[in-house]
Every structure is written in C-alpha cells, then in structure tokens.
Image: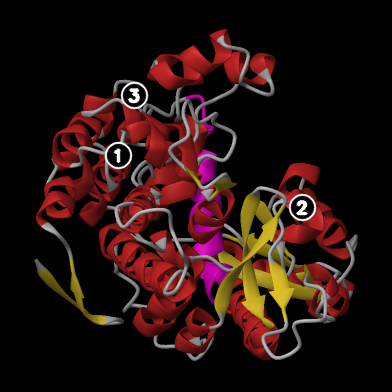
Amino acid sequence: MEIRDPVHGSIYYSDPEVAVLDTAEYQRLRAIKQLGFSEFSFPGATHNRYLHSIGVAHLAGLVFDSIFRVYPFSKPSVKPRFRQVLRLAALLHDVGHGPLSHTTEQVMPPLADLKIKIYDEQEKAGALADTVMYKNRRANHEDYTIKYVTDSPIAETISRSFQDIKPLHIACLIDKSLQCPDDFFIDQGVDFRPILSQLVSSEIDADRMDYLERDSYFCGTNYGKIDTNWLIQNMTFYRVDDKLYLALNRRALYSFDDFLISRHHMHLMVYCHHKSIIYEEMLNRYLTSPDCTFVLPGDISEYTRYNDYRLHEHLASVENPWAKRIAQRRPFKVLLEQHNTTESERPDQIRAALEKEGIETIRASSKMRLSKYHSASPEERAAQIFVVDQYDRWNKPAPISESTEIFKRYEGARIIDRLYVAPENYHQAELLLKDRKL
C-alpha cells in the first residue's frame, strides 16, 4: 500500500504491515494528537500519532538500509527479518499513548490491572531488575504499548502475518529491559539487538528524526528542521565484543550537533509554549481533583475506546472549574515569564504576595536540558552511540559524548518559570506587581 505523507512523500507498506495498521487498536492513534494542546498556539498542529508512527517506521527502514547495505549476514533471510522487526517496533512504539499523551498518565491504573503476561513471566524468572517497583507502581503509556504488542488483537495479527517474528521480539526493541527468550537477534555470534533498539530509541533515532521534521512542518516553524538525509547516509555500526552499536561517521558530527540543538529549541519554543503548559496544568489540576471522574481502564479492549475526543467530551460534561475552563477555552493568563539557567525565588515571592490578596495563581516551571544523556542511568550510558572516522581508520571510535563539545556547552538546564492568573484577575495582579515593585 502506498501512503502519501506530507513530510516524507510516498511511503510503502506491505500487506502484512497493513494488517497491523488496520486493527482497531492501531487506528485509535488517529484520534490521539501528536502535540496535545499545542494546536491552541499553532493551529496547524493537529497531526496525530498514527501519521507520526507511520513516518517513524518509514525512516527506520531507510536507516537500516543505509547501515547494512553491504553487511555480510550469514544468509539472505536474516537481513529482511531484522529489517522487518525494526519497522514493526518503530510502527508500534507509540501505540499505548493515552488521550492527550503524557498528562493523562496521572489517571492510569496500577500496573497489575493491565495483566501483562510477559511481565509476569519475566518476574517469575527473575528477569525484572526491580520486582518491587514492578508490583507497586502506576502503569504508564509504555506499559500499555507492551500490552498491545504482546497481548491484544495487534499481537494476534502479528503472529498470523509474520511467520518468523514473534510479538515479544518486537517488544524487546521497544523495552530494552525485557529479556529476549531466544537467539532471534544473534547472527554469526553477533547480537544486533543493541543497535536495532537504538534506532527505535536513542539520542538519534527514527522517532526523533520524524517528529522534529513533522512537528516543525505542521506548526509552521523553522525550529526542528534537520539534515535527515545526511544523518541517515552517515549512520553506521560499531562492534564492541559480541554486540553491535549505532555509530555515526565523524563528517556528520556537525549535523548531529544541529540535530540536538534543533530539538532543544523545539522544546523551548514549541513544546513548552505558555498556552500548552497552562492547559496541561489545568488538566492536571482536574485529574488530581477529588471530584475527577475520568480514569483510564486497565482492560486493553476498553482502553482502546479512549482517545482525545472522549476526554474533551468528558471535560465538557462535568462541573469541575478546571475542566470547564479547558472546555470553554478560558485558560489562566501569563503574568510573569522568566528564562533562567538556575532556580529563582522571585516567582514564589510574587505568588505569595498575590495569594495574600486573594488572587489564585498557578506556577509552572519547565526545565529542559539538551540531552537525556546528562541524567541517563549507567545502563543507558553503556548503550553508547559511537563516532567513527570513515577516512581515518586508525583513529579509534569513541563515544559520541566524548567526540563533540555540544554536551559540555549545553550541560546546564534552561528553566522557564511562569506565573499564571485567571484572566478576570489579570489587571488587578498587574497593578499589584507595579505598585509593590515585585
């Protein structure tokens, strides 16, 4: 099947892949917006996770073809098998997202309610790193993704349509903590799981390459524009012992720097736009209110019926003041905005003064760093991306974090502190700030 994508042009899906796309569980992503409330700031940002995921799988295939164009696999069937499991993992990486994405994770049930068989099996086998956390924590969208991939009609479709790929193999690329039960990712003694997982989720993966370009396109901004083709052409592999890791030719290192900066600027200027933030804050206040009646079910069939539209309909039907503000488009308004590199006490001082006068305020602090590498766990740091010298083979490959100054230059966090007040109180709050010179 040919799909005309506004970002990547014509992209193609095989009949077995289309069978996955056509499941009701996957079609649900058409009703989950990629950028949640961002459409209130950028009216064009109404694209959905369905379209994004289709683009991610397309890019994953292109990257795989570039990296392994001349790799000597043991037999002809290995290459298409690895390529296919990667495309499926890329296609399904977001399938578990809740309505309006991350904010509604507050009302997800305990993880045990999802009854994820593979988690139970791996816990009994002692394969889960933190059994206590597994048993007691709240579910998140990644847990729903694993449920969809391994125990739902999507899993049944995969089992019917792909004879040499099991749903668990796909899940192993989405969730790096899962134990693979066989040698599926091994060829000639080399483990390909690390590099394939990195193409699904890492500092430079197919997911980020797609959403940066796609979000930039639909928001109508220049932030997020990256040299995707050059990056893909220069992606390669590097072997450490018996494992294969993602690598980048040094000549594309500046494009990688630009990639990270573009993503950073998208967070600062688009993803953390003041309107998006206040709507998320108001939704959070409703979802944590004692009278909130919106909860996400653990049953995967019922969960499939929950999307953005259902949440918006719910918000319009209840009397909670926060829900009504969202439904009626009456958000709190920015009174103060500060951009800092360190924590500031001023917003709290102003908030205290305003609330003393009976003016309700919302303080929102958005903290962003260039890379998740700064706060990565030892396990994540171990799965490094390497830089190789295509024209200097005597120069030993090095981790990308040691090959560019970008991590050091942007090591500090950027903090956007905002104070919001109700529009009906804005003039009074503004006068108080001016009179008291706060």
Q: Which residue is mark 3?
A: 297
The magenta region covers 270-290
In three-dimensional space, the C-alpha distance between marks 2 and 3, rounded to whole angstroms, equals 35 Å
Viewer-closest of 152 and 15? 15
- Residue drawn at (31%, 79%) of the image: 44
Horizontal and vertical percent position of residue 192:
53, 50
Viewer-closest of 297 and 120? 120
**Magenta-drawn stretch, dominant element (helix, strand or loop):** helix
- Residue drawn at (33%, 62%) of the image: 57
- Residue drawn at (76%, 52%) of the image: 381
Was residue 307 drawn as part of the magenta stretch in this picture? no
Disc 1 marks a residue whose amino acid type is Ile
Cβ–Cβ under 8 Å for marks 2 and 3: no
Horizontal and vertical percent position of residue 243:
64, 50
Q: Is residue 213 above or below residue 320?
A: below
Label 3 Cα crowd, 10 Å radius (few <14 / some 14-19 / many 20+): some
Q: Secondary structure at mark 3?
A: loop
In three-dimensional space, the C-alpha distance between marks 2 and 1, rounded to whole angstroms, equals 29 Å
In three-dimensional space, the C-alpha distance between marks 1 and 3, rounded to whole angstroms, equals 29 Å
Q: Which mark is residue 381?
A: 2
Q: Which residue is mark 1?
A: 165
